[in-house]
């Protein structure tokens, strides 16, 4: 049985993950990490990683980018594989993740859903095939999401940008009078409303024709299930940055 330390255990995604683990014979929660200490019958949530005495086989993080440095320190010190499911990381954060992956295996992605990652893969193919088509990305999430645009929107942009030879440029929040759209400009539009779990759409618009790809998350479970699949995969690795496409067996 795989022992999981759940980071962000008292948050919405942490609670979804814990519920799934309790129903899964392959996993058990060894301990939790969050801002408030809580004791359950089967495990305890700690407010400081250094207080944790229970052994873990893997850490799954659904907290926030603010916990990254303490997680990297704890994981590398204790040689525990790390599944990072938080978003909003900046370039410095990504550098720290890469450095830590020289000691332990780490998976970091903006989305652990199979459907989303297939969408990203197909978007890259279409961006290559549809030369000259304008590209726009729209994402919508619940009104409590802190970062914008979403990690998934950035994943989609990175994929199409790679297909277009790294020539594309992000544009946010157009308003007022604008010039004709630059062919390399990609508008990324972030909506925050209600309890939307996560909607993403990419539009390829050419002369007199439009192709749209969209993904709608109907439950937070899809992200938790993907993180468990990643955890099962990563514990077999010694070190390094593992790509989500390898976990989900997508693409070449």
Image (cartoon, rainbow, N blue to C red):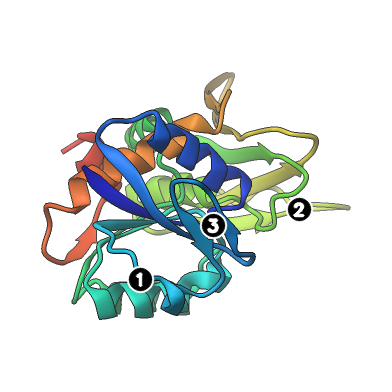
Where residue 6 appears, x then y in whole percent? 44, 54
Report the residue at 18% width, 66% height from top.
Answer: 240
Mark 1 vs mark 3, CA separation in Å:
18 Å
Closer to the camera: disc 1 or disc 2?
1
Instruction: State which quarter of the image contains the C terminus.
Output: top left
Where residue 16 appears, x then y in whole percent? 53, 37
For label 2, the residue is: 173
Mark 1 vs mark 2, CA separation in Å:
47 Å
Report the residue at 37% width, 43% height from top.
Answer: 227
Asked which secondary structure carries label 2, the reply is loop
For label 1, the residue is: 53
Left or right: residue 140 versus residue 125 is right
Report the residue at 24% width, 46% height from top.
Answer: 2
Where residue 83 appears, x then y in whole percent? 34, 55
Mark 2 vs mark 3, CA separation in Å:
31 Å
From where the camera sits, is residue 221 visible? yes
1 or 2: tag closer to the N-terminus: 1
Closer to the camera: disc 2 or disc 3?
3
1 or 3: tag closer to the N-terminus: 3
Instruction: State which quarter of the image contains the N terminus.
Output: top left
Closer to the camera: disc 1 or disc 3?
1
Which labelled disc corresponds to residue 8?
3
Report the residue at 36% width, 31% height from top.
Answer: 114
Q: Quadrant of residue 247?
A: top left
Asked which secondary structure carries label 1, the reply is loop
Given the current orientation, which residue lies at the most extreme front position?
Answer: 41
Asked which secondary structure carries label 3, the reply is loop
Where residue 139 appears, x then y in whole percent? 63, 39
2 or 3: tag closer to the N-terminus: 3
Left or right: residue 79 versus residue 34 is left
Between residues 61 and 197, which one lies in front from this camera angle?
A: 61
């Amino acid at each position: 049985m795989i022992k999981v330390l759940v980071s962000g255990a008292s948050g919405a995604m942490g609670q979804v993950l814990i519920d799934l683990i309790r129903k899964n014979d392959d996993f058990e929660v060894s301990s939790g990490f969050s801002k408030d200490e809580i004791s359950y019958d089967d495990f305890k949530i700690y407010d400081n990683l250094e207080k944790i005495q229970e052994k873990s086989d893997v850490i799954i993080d659904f907290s926030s980018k603010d916990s990254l440095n303490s997680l990297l320190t704890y994981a590398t010190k204790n040689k525990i594989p790390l599944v990072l499911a938080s978003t909003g990381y900046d370039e410095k954060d990504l550098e720290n993740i890469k450095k830590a992956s020289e000691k332990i295996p780490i998976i970091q992605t903006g989305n652990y859903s199979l459907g989303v990652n297939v969408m990203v893969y197909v978007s890259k193919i279409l961006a290559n095939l549809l030369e000259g088509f304008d590209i726009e990305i729209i994402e919508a999430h619940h009104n409590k999401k802190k970062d914008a645009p979403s990690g998934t929107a950035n994943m989609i942009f990175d994929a199409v940008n790679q297909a277009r030879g790294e020539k594309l440029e992000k544009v946010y929040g157009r308003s007022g009078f604008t010039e004709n759209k630059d062919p390399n400009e990609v508008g990324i539009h972030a909506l925050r409303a209600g309890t939307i779990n996560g909607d993403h759409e990419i539009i390829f618009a050419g002369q007199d024709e439009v192709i749209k790809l969209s993904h709608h998350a109907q439950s937070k479970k899809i992200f938790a299930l993907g993180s468990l699949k990643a955890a099962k995969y990563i514990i077999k690795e010694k070190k390094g940055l593992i790509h989500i496409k390898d976990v989900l067996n997508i693409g070449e």
